[in-house]
Image (cartoon, grey):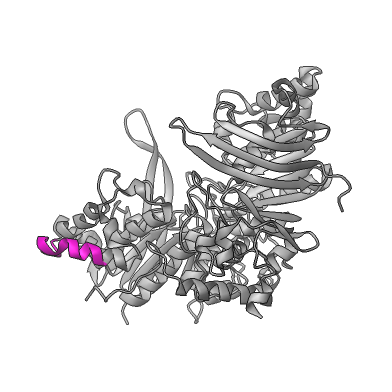
Amino acid sequence: MSVSPLIEIRDLRIRFHGDDGRITYAVDSVDLSVANGATLGLVGESGCGKSVTSLAIMGLLPKQSAEISGAIRFDDFDLLKTPDQTLRDLRGNRLAMIFQEPMTSLNPSLTIGDQIIETILRHRGGSRRNARERAIELLRRVHIPSPERRIDEYPHKLSGGMRQRVMIAMALACDPRLLIADEPTTALDVTLQAQILELMRELKAASGAAIILITHDLGVVAEVCDEVAVMYAGEIVERAPVDELFSAPQHPYTVGLLGSIPRLDHRAEQLATIEGMVPNMAQPPAGCRFAARCPFVLDACIKAPPPLIETSPGHLSRCIRAPLERLVS
Amino acid sequence: MTALLEVEGLVKHFVAERSLFGRAVAHVKAVDGVSFSLEAGRTLALVGESGCGKSTVSRLVLRLIEPDAGSVRFDGRDLLALDAGGLRAFRREAQIIFQDPYASLNPRMTVGQILTEPLALHDLVPAARRSERVAEILRLVGLEPRLARRYPHEFSGGQRQRIAIARALAVEPKLIICDEPVSALDVSIRSQILNLLRELQDRLGLAYIFVSHDLAVVKHIADRVAVMNLGQIVEEADADELFATPRHPYSRALLSAIPLPQPHAKRAKVLLQGEIPSALNPPPGCRFHTRCPFVIERCRNEAPALLADDGGHATACHRVSELPSADTLLPAAGGVSPALAKLVAAFSRKTEGAAVSGVGIQGTAPTTK
């Protein structure tokens, strides 16, 4: 499927230095790649490092407190070594991002048209009139009714679903090669979520852009992603093609997650629970970070950090007990 | 068996705009003629999207806000006729848990103080025995008694929700209203709280009104489901029945909009077009007609009544008898592969054996009755 990936992350490590001298190990040795036209789901619970990873790709982490190492290769750039000026040219252009909260990521004092036009003029230049026409076209593409009229409205006049469409239109303004969507539908009602997911599928098919979708919702992952990376406590614990992840997960954390969701397509008397708590990331455990909560734990798990091993082609697990089928047969 | 709670024709309109002289000129019709009943020890789910009135109903039932019309009977008593003293006594029997455990606990009180307050307020336990009772309640929700000395900020979201549940349980209620109790929680924590709620129901015979937008959660926890749209119930049925044969086009759309954790799931989808209309000015006739794929002229003019069949499955739709079968919309079973089922079973079995401090349910003696 992949010839040469569009974006390739190698050994990404991110540490935050707090004011009190404390270090938080937010992301550790993350390797990821996404091919043109593919959608990667980045899944995990609060604080697992999924959003921090995406902010690192966008170059949006605070320079004073975030210490970043590794490499993020995108096109011909290493994004971690790219000067700010070049990054500004890339962002909104070839790299675009959609955030969870459309209410706070739009400027309330500018019309939606002004905000989209600003992006187009900044990256593409040309006349304001042409940019406006393109903005109307974009609003039409994300199915905003009567875009000629809507373009002059302020964000507060739009509903949540409409605002998220505007955010998507803005992200698409310069035909990005990579779109990062951070919980794009979490703030929306289910019927609107279904509309936005459908829209993302449609746009992906039309533009061929690669998408990194960050979410905690495994249903959303199953519906739109080709490949999934599960993160836990700053590390990728499992990576697999979407079908395999849902049918034969190879990391106990993934098993726990899949078992803990109530499902419409399956009846469970009791939901699985993952006992215990996420480790304190100021002092991550020496061995496997999930060991303290893992029902399959061995002494060896606690002693050394487990490597990411390939259990079948394209399926990686950071668990020394994988393949897990051995444990239940 | 008579119902624990009977709600009849509940109406609440909020004033959205006033004229210069203070006369109301626009109303949000938050709840517009809602009726249902709930038996002791059962769970009724109120389902719908933002602004459908489900939270307003739950507040009306507790008389946290006053209805404009309708009646609420709890255990045979007319709630709307209660005076202040009677209302306080009623609050002992009906409690509420809110969505956001970060906002619903007073940050300046310790957990012990938070849990002692209802005991003192209702004078349930003599002062000398209160700390003992607090320890009991904490154990009941799976927290260690020593945590009573701590403040809410020292707990995780899931633990805070346990504290909120503990506070509701302190007065030994018969009914707990759970308003989106797991929406703000991570998935693995969510399952702990859902399991806890079910276990408490079995053990203490609690009735729940479970307000949620998440049908998968509702399917797991509810005995009966009422689907609301713009202030009205559009469909009400036993949970199994509703999920097997949803009738109202809105219920079907909601059901098919939920992303399934099953890649390449084979099912048809109803994608609703357009936005949710405002409750400020709900559409005439059937309030769903602007988004309904089966709309006919009659729907635009005449509001359908909520009519129940012999099995107690009620639907408010003019076209209910002529709608196509919903079978293609339903998620096919088999989303859980045999391999996954085995792994999850092994995962759960092992976890139950492991004793982890601070979480998980610890053995307790029955504390009520």
What residue lies at 80% left-to-right and 34% top-to-bottom?
A: A175
Residue A259 is situated, as x and y percent measured from the top left of the image, at: 57, 68
Q: Residue farthest to the top?
A: A127
**Quadrant of the image occupied by residue B251:** bottom right
Q: Which secondary structure class fits the magenta region best? A: helix
Task: Inspect this view and state whether residue A160 appears.
Answer: yes
Residue B43 lies, with reference to residue A65, above or below; the image says: below
- Relative side of B83 to B60, left or right: left
Q: Is residue B135 magenta?
A: yes
What residue lies at 54% left-to-right and 61% top-to-bottom?
A: A291
Residue B122 is situated, as x and y percent measured from the top left of the image, at: 16, 60
Quarter of the C terminus of chain A within the rendering: bottom right
- Relative side of A116 to A51, left or right: right
**Quadrant of the image occupied by residue A100:** top right
**The one of A68 and B66 positioned closer to us in this rendering:** A68
Q: Is residue A195 magenta?
A: no
Q: Which residues are magenta?
A: B123-136
What residue lies at 78% left-to-right and 33% top-to-bottom?
A: A137
**The one of A306 and B24 positioned closer to us in this rendering:** A306
**The one of A3 and A19 positioned closer to us in this rendering:** A19
Residue A292 lies, with reference to residue A38, above or below; the image says: below
- Relative side of A8 to B96, left or right: right
What residue lies at 41% left-to-right and 54% top-to-bottom?
A: B55
Residue B77 is situated, as x and y percent measured from the top left of the image, at: 22, 68
